[in-house]
Amino acid sequence: MRLLMVFLTGALFSAGLMISGMINPAKVIGFLDIFGDWDPSLAFVMALAVLVYGIGLRFVLKRPKPLFEASFSLPKGSVIDRKLVSGAILFGIGWGLVGLCPGPAIAALGAAPGQAAIFVVAMLAGMLATRMLQRS
Amino acid sequence: MHDYIAASIGGILIGAAALLLMASHGKIMGISGIVSRLLPPLASDWQWRLAFVAGIIAAPLAWRAVSGPMPAIEISASTPMLIIAGAIVGLGTTLGNGCTSGHGVCGVSRLSKRSLVATGLFMASAIVTVTISKQLLGN
C-alpha cells in the first residue's frame, strides 16, 4: 500500500515533467538561453511548484507525523561549504551541456530510451564514484 | 495547449507530488538523492526509493499506452557529450546534495539557505554554459 502510494507519487511527478515540457532537453536549453532566443515558459514550472509546495507544506507539517513514517525528515543544515558551492556549479554545467537534470533524465528512460539511457548510466557512475571518494 | 499554461499545470503537479511524498513518507522529493542512495552502499530504506523511481519511468509508458503521442524529447548532444554531461551531473548533484527538484523546488520553497545558494549557482552556471555553447561556439 505504502509502496503503491510512492509509485503513484513518482508517476505524478513524471507526468508534471512531461506536461510542463521539462522532459524535453531542447526546451530546457531554450529556457537557459536567456541571452539568445529565450523561452521563459519553464520559469512557470518552478514558480508554480514552489508556490504549491510552499503553501501546502505549512499544512502538511502541522500534522504530528507523516502517514507511513514516525517523523518528518527535513534537512537542517545551513552551512554553505565548498562542497555545496562546487557541486551546484558542476551540476549546472552538466545540466546546460545537454539539457537534462536527474528527474527528467529518468523520466526520459520511459519515453525515449537510447540517448537518455547513456546519460543516466554516466550519471549513476558519477554518483557512485563521488560517493566512493567521499567515503575513502 | 499554450506553453505557459502547460508549464504551470506541470509545475502544480510537481509541487503536489513533492507534497504527497512529505505527507506520506516525510521525505524531501530530491531525485538525485533518492536515486544515488539506490547505489552501493544501498540505503536501508531503499524500497520507497525504488518504488518512486519506478513510478517516474512508468508514467511515460502509461502515457504512451493511453494517449499515444508522447511529448517531444529532442536531444541534440552527441554520445560523448551525453556521457560527459551525465557524469558531471552525477558528480555535482552528489557533491552539492541536490538538484533541480530537491534544492530548486523543495529547498527554495522552505527558504533553506543552502538550497537558495545552490539553486542560484546551478541556474547561473547552466545559463553560462548554454550561452557559451550557443552564442560563442554556435552549437
Image (tube, coloured by chain):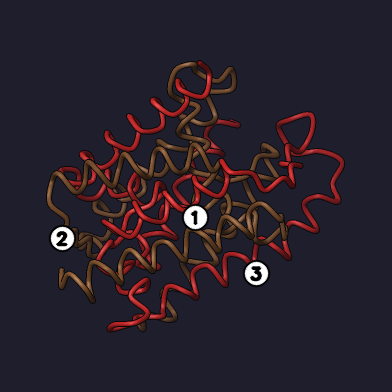
Marked residue nearer the N-terminal end (1 or 2): 2
Dot 1 amino acid type: Thr
Q: Which residue is mark 1?
A: B100
Image quadrant in which you'd find residue A1: top right
Q: Secondary structure at mark 2?
A: loop
Q: CA distance from mark 2 to mark 3?
A: 32 Å
Report which colour depicts chain A.
red
Q: Disc 2 residue type? A: Ser
Tint applied to chain B in the drawing? brown
Q: Could you tell me which residue is drawn at 38 percent across and 52 percent down?
A: A101
Mark 1 element type: helix
Q: Which residue is mark 3?
A: A51
Question: Relative to B84, does residue B51 appear above or below in the rendering?
Answer: above
Of residues B11 and B95, which is closer to you in this image? Answer: B95
Q: Which residue is mark 2?
A: B76
The percent coordinates of residue B119 (x first, y second) are 55, 59
Q: Where residue A84 sits in the image (x, y, percent)?
A: 57, 45
Residues indicated by labels 1 and 2 sit on the same polypeptide chain = yes
Identified by mark 3, the residue type is: Leu
